Amino acid sequence: MQNRYSFGGDEHLFVECSEEMSLEAFFKSLSMTNAIRESNIKGITEICPANASFQIKFNPDVIHPDDMLRQVQQIEKVANKAEPKIATRIVEIPVYYQDPWTHETLMRFRERHQNPDATDIEYAAEINGFSSVPDFINAHSGAPWFVSMVGFVSGLPFMYQMVDQPRQIQVPKYLSPRTDTPKLTVGYGGCFSCIYSVRGAGGYQMFGITPMPIFDPEEKISYLKDFMVFFKPGDIVKFKPIGREEYDQCVADVEQGKFWPKSCDVTFDLQDFQQDIDAYNSKLEGLINEC
Amino acid sequence: MSVKVLHPGLATTVQDLGRPGYFHLGIPIGGAMDRLAMRAANLLVGNAEDAAGLEAVFVGPKLEFMEDAVIAVTGAEMPVKVDGDEKPTWTAIHVKAGQILSFDFLKSGARICLAISGGIDVPQALGSRSTYPIGALGGFKGRAIAEGDILPIGAANSVNEGRSIPVTLRRTPGNPAELRVLPGLYWHRITEEAGNNFFEDEWKVAPEADRMGYRFCGGRPLDFVDREPPFGAGSDPSNVVDCCYPYGSIQVPGGKEPIILHRDAVSGGGYFMVGTVISADMDLIGQLQPHTPTKFVRVTMDEALQARADRASILNAIRTSLE
C-alpha cells in the first residue's frame, strides 16, 4: 500500500493511503498520523486522520511544503515496517433501534428515499440480503466498529465495521439530503455508520438513536466535563441494542449526571485480528462486558 | 464597558482569528472570513490583532455604546454612522457613551469587520472567541447576536482617533474576481479538457454562499475519467471514500457547481476536490457578493508562496503605517 501525496494549497498536505476503504488503509492512516504527532515536526498546526487518508495543516512560513512532504514520506517508510498495533479504548454505545423519533423524521422525507414504502432499516436489511430487521440489527450490533474519522461537523464519528469486506453492510445515502435529522441518530451511508452529534441536515439512512450525548459545547455532562467531544479516531465501538425502558433510564441518568459510558483500554493488533476476525471480536466483546 | 444590540443585522457574529487545533474533531478554525481586515480593524483601535470583533454580512448592526470607545470598520464598504453622522471606514472613530452606531446600505464587498477598543470580551471556547453556530460554540452564547444582547467589552488601550489605513493597503477582490488555485487533491479524476475548461470559464458566485462555503455556477460541467468505483466510495463519479477537506478546497459534487470551503468548513466528506484556493486569496472570498463574476487562476506552489509573502508584506505595511 503506497501513499499518494498532494498539496491542498500552500497550507495542507493531503495523503491518500488507499483509494478504496479497508481496515488496512484506515490502520495506516491512523498509525501514520500518530507517528507524525509524535515526531513534533515544526510548523504542523493540525493533523486530521480520515477513513483511508489523512491531512496535515502546516504553516509554510515555518516549514517549506517540500520539506514537509519529505519528512512525512520518511515517516511512511518507518510506518510500513512498524508493528501494526495501536493503544486505544473500546466503548459500548447503547442504541434504541427503530425508535419513534427517527421514525417520525424518516416518514417526513419518504419522497427523498429509494424505497418510500419501507423504512430506512427495512430497506437496508433487504438490499443487504437479510431476511428480517432483527437479523440486520444483530449484524449491525454484533461485530465492533472502528471510529475511522471524527468530523464533518462537531464531534461526529464515522465508523467502519471490523468484519471482512464481503460482510460489510453497504447502503446508499438518501437520493437527496433531508433538512432534518434528530440529534444522536445512528445513521448509515456507503460502508460507514455514524452518530449525528447535533440536529441538522443529513443524507445517511436512519436506524436508531442513542441516549448518550457525544458533544457538549458547555461541558456540563458528567463524562464530557473535561472535553466537549466524546470520540477520537481509533476508538473501538460496540453497539448494544436497548429498548424504550432502558433508553428512558439512560436519558434520565445522563440528566442527573449519573451516566458513565462503559469503556476500557485495549491494544489492537491488526495481524492477530486478521488471523481470526470472529475470535478477535469475541475477545473484544468479552472485554467490554467485563468493564 | 458594554455595547447594546439594538438591531443585529443579518448574521452578525463575534469573530477573532479562529481556533486552530480541533479540525480533526470536526470543529473548524472559524474566525473572521477576511482576516486582514479584522487585523487592520483591531490595530486601528489599539487592540491585539487577534482580539474579537464583530463580522457582519451584507447588513450592518445597530449598536448603542454604554461608555466611550474607539471603533474601526474595515472590509466591505458600508457607510458608517454615529448618531446619524457619516464617518469614514478604515479609520479609528471616537464614539461617546450613549451614541448609536449604525450602517447604511452595502456599497461593495460583503463583510465588514468592526473592532471596538478593548475587544469583545465573551468567554473563550477552545482558545477562541469565534462563533461556530452549528456547534453552538464560542461567540455570544454560541450564536449570532440578537436584539437586546449586551456585548461585554474588555479594557481598552489609549489610541488616537482619526488615524486610518491608506487606500493602497486595503485589499479587495477585483471584478471579475480572481481566485488563485493550486490544482491537486483529486484533480486526476477529471479529463484534461475539463481541467482546462475549469480555468477558462467565467463562474459566478451562487446564492448559497456563507461562512461554511461558497458555491459557484455558470461554468461548463466537468467530465470525469472513467473508473470502477472503489469500495466505500459510492457510485457517482464525483464520490470518493470520505476524506478530509482542506480549507479553501474546491469540491464539485456531480461535476457541476464548485464549492469552496471556508472558515466554518465541514472537516470532511465524500466529494472529490479539484484543488485548493491559496491561503493569500482566502480573505477575498469573504468579500464576494452573490452573482460576482469569478475566474479561477491556476498557479504553482512557488507562485502560491510568493502571493503569501506579498500578503504578509501588506500586513506589515499596515502595522508600520500605524506605529
Image (cartoon, rainbow, N blue to C red):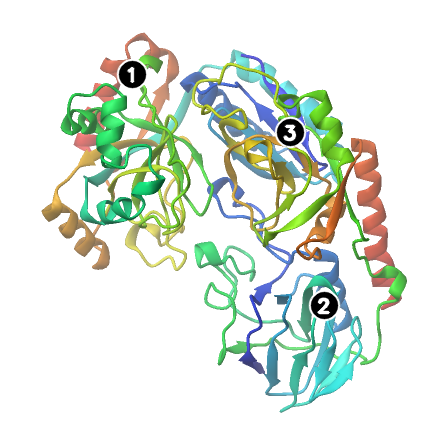
Toward which corner of the image does residue A117 lie, by quadrant?
top left
Which of discs 3 and 2 lies nearer the camera? The answer is 3
Q: CA distance from mark 1 to mark 2?
A: 57 Å
- Give the position of the N terminus of chain B as an image quadrant: bottom right
| Badge 3: chain ID | B
**Residue where numbered disc 2 is placed:** B42
Q: Nearer the viewer, mark 1 or mark 2?
A: 1
Say which residue appears at 66% left-offset and 26% top-offset: B187
Three-letter amino acid code at the position of disc 1 = Arg
Residue A254 rendering spot, x and y as whole percentages:
23, 54
Tell which subunit mark 1 falls on: A
Q: CA distance from mark 3 to mark 1?
A: 35 Å
The amino acid type, in three-letter code, at marker 2 is Asn
Task: In the displayed orientation, state which residue is furthest to the bottom.
Answer: B98
Position of A290 compared to B2: left or right? left
Task: Check disc 2 and report its element: helix, strand or loop.
Answer: helix
- Left or right for A105, reference B245: left
Asked whether, in this view, residue A169 is left or right of residue B97, the answer is: left
Q: Residues within 10 Å of mark 2 (few under 14, many from 20)?
A: many
Quick check: can you spot residue B52?
Answer: no
Q: Which residue is mark 1?
A: A167
Determine which residue is flagged by label 3. B222
- Which chain does the residue under circle 2 lie in? B
Q: Earlier in the sequence, mark 3 or mark 2?
A: 2
- The answer to whether dots 3 and 2 both sit on one chain is yes
Above or below, A285 against A82 in this view is below
Tell me residue B322's x, y (percent): 85, 68
Q: Is residue A21 above or below residue A54?
A: above
**Mark 3: which amino acid?**
Leu
Measuring 54% from the left and 48% from the top, which residue is drawn there?
B28
Q: Secondary structure at mark 1?
A: helix
Depth check: give the residue in front, B310 or A183: A183
